[in-house]
Amino acid sequence: MSPRLPLYCPPGGLACLAGLEPEADLRSVFDVHELPGRYRVGPFELSGVPLPHYVPNVGVRLENGLVALAYTGDTGPDPLLAELGRDTDLYIVEATDWKGEPQQSHRNLLTSEEAGYRAAQAGTRRLMLTHFWPGNDRAASAASARSTFGGEVLIAVEDIVVPLEPI
């Protein structure tokens, strides 16, 4: 029998996958590690921070003493975003900029300006914006993030390669 693949996910993540493959025994395929939590993954320490969204969401941080990067996943505003991205070389933050989102009482998504603000609070070196609402102007999103973040702002695009530099 082959070793199971490690799967790091919020509670209930495997059940969501099981909905796609209801006849498969996913526990025979995946070695599930629930987040939040701390785990050793190769040369990295992986940690997770619970963040607000309409389904369970965990922002993820990878670090090894030389480099650190973090990714929010879909999230609404939360003070923990600054801790997640603290002193990273690269902070990948969703920037949906959905026009209907700011009017809602419970926020599930960020604006580009908020992404920049949280990156500035975190002291990250570089911010990569991702998870754009369809049809949004990505250059405008980057400009909005730059209004609150003074570092380099990147846009997530297919096949982008971002070298990580020691912190």
Image: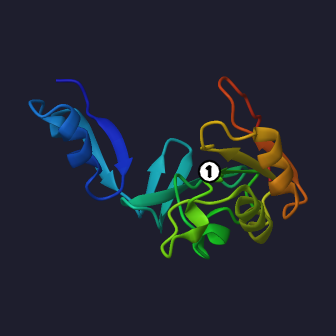
Q: Nearer the viewer, residue 131 or 30?
A: 131
Q: Position of residue 23 (x, y in %)?
A: 8, 30
Is 151 left or right of 107, judged from the image as shown? right
Is 17 left or right of 69, judged from the image as shown? left
Q: Quadrant of residue 53?
A: bottom left
Residue situated furthest right in the rendering: 150
Q: Residue at x 26, y 30 (%)?
A: 3
Q: Quadrant of residue 139?
A: top right
Q: Position of residue 121 (x, y in %)?
A: 76, 71
Q: Amino acid at mark 1?
A: Thr
Crowdedness near tag 1: few (<14), some (14–19) or many (≥20) residues, C-alpha within 10 Å: many
Q: Position of residue 130 (x, y in %)?
A: 65, 43
Which residue, given by chain and number where applicable, does mark 1 sit on? 96
Q: Nearer the viewer, residue 85 or 156?
A: 156
**Measured along the vertical axis of the image, is residue 140 above or below residue 39?**
above
**Measured along the vertical axis of the image, is residue 72 above or below residue 25?**
below
Q: Residue at x 68, y 55 (%)?
A: 65
Is 144 left or right of 104, judged from the image as shown? right
